[in-house]
Image (cartoon, rainbow, N blue to C red):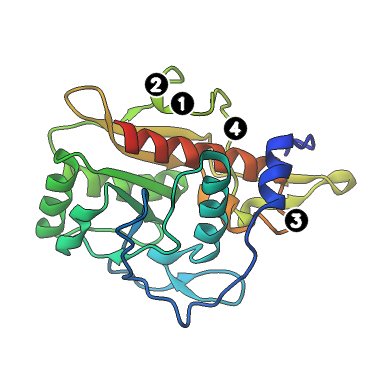
Amino acid sequence: MAIKTGVAGFALCLVAGIATSQTALEGRDPNSDNPSAEFQMARVKYRTIGGGGSHGIFQPWWAIDYPFAEEHFFAALRRVTNIKVAEEEPHLELTDDRIFRYPFLFLQQPGRGDWRPTSEEAARLREYLLRGGFLLIDDLHGEYDWSILQTALRKVMPDRSISEIPLDDPLMHVFYDLDENTAIPGDRHLRIGPGGKIVAQMQGQPHWRGIYDDHKRLMVAINFNIDMGDSWEHADDPYYPVPMTALGYKFGVNYVIYAMTH
């Protein structure tokens, strides 16, 4: 996939306004609450072996892209929506009662992280979703990763299927009109092609998939063969294509507003 070279004014506006403090993990409180904020996201913390990362920080798979992805995206979210967004997010296991305080959960790298929820964790997540919570899953690539996630979600929602999110779904139009079937690459997918052009070598076609409730509202949204988190994390990296960061921001904004209004 060749990366488009045209730069939207939206992207320039956001990148120019990004906070680039690059604060290290030390000194942060991953369990902080901000009751005065209109929006606060929580990351799902799960058991994992190994990990990865960038910027000289090694993270377990569930924490990939943290904290830079959130620093950049939250700044963009404030800038384009005026939503009062909490500065920090908690990191919570699914057995933690506090998950019910947060209508928006973010789960990263379920494939490489080998996410296999226990029966108790699956039951708690099922309760969370049926009570109106929203789960966004990002950064899984290829059929092996997909099989791990599919097995996990069957345990969570055995009576509900995963389906493709159609382009006319409210998610795709709640704030930005998103009709591009364009993969958002991770930094690891980028290569220097002929003539110095940045190209992306993905592991498959992009898919936006999800699980719906009885009222046709999304409970779970899945970015498959997509790395939206990297588009946030590398927003100030000159090597990462600005149009892809812009697209990643647009999807992120739509996810947040959809979750807050449905």
Q: For the residues marked 4 and 2, what is the alpha-carbon distance in whole angstroms? A: 17 Å
Mark yes or no: residue 95 visible: no
Q: Nearer the viewer, mark 3 or mark 1?
A: 1
Residue type at mark 4 is Thr
Residue type at mark 3 is Tyr
Q: Nearer the viewer, mark 3 or mark 2?
A: 2
Residue type at mark 2 is Asp
Total numbered labels:
4
Q: Earlier in the sequence, mark 1 or mark 4?
A: 1
Q: Are marks 3 and 1 in contact (CB under 8 Å)?
A: no
Point out residue 25 in the picture as x, y percentages from the top left corner: 48, 77
Q: Secondary structure at mark 2?
A: loop
In this rendering, position of residue 18 left or right of residue 218: right
Residue that badge 3 annotates: 239
Q: Is residue 107 above or below residue 87?
A: above
In this rendering, position of residue 159 left or right of residue 1: left
Mark yes or no: residue 22 visible: yes
- The local crowd at label 1, few if under 14, some if 14 to 19, many if 20 or more residues have their Cα within 10 Å, is many
Residue that badge 4 annotates: 182
Q: Which mark is residue 169?
A: 2
Quarter that holds the C terminus: top left
Q: Secondary structure at mark 1?
A: helix
Q: Nearer the viewer, mark 4 or mark 2?
A: 2
Q: For the residues marked 4 and 3, what is the alpha-carbon distance in whole angstroms? A: 19 Å
Q: Are marks 2 and 1 in contact (CB under 8 Å)?
A: yes
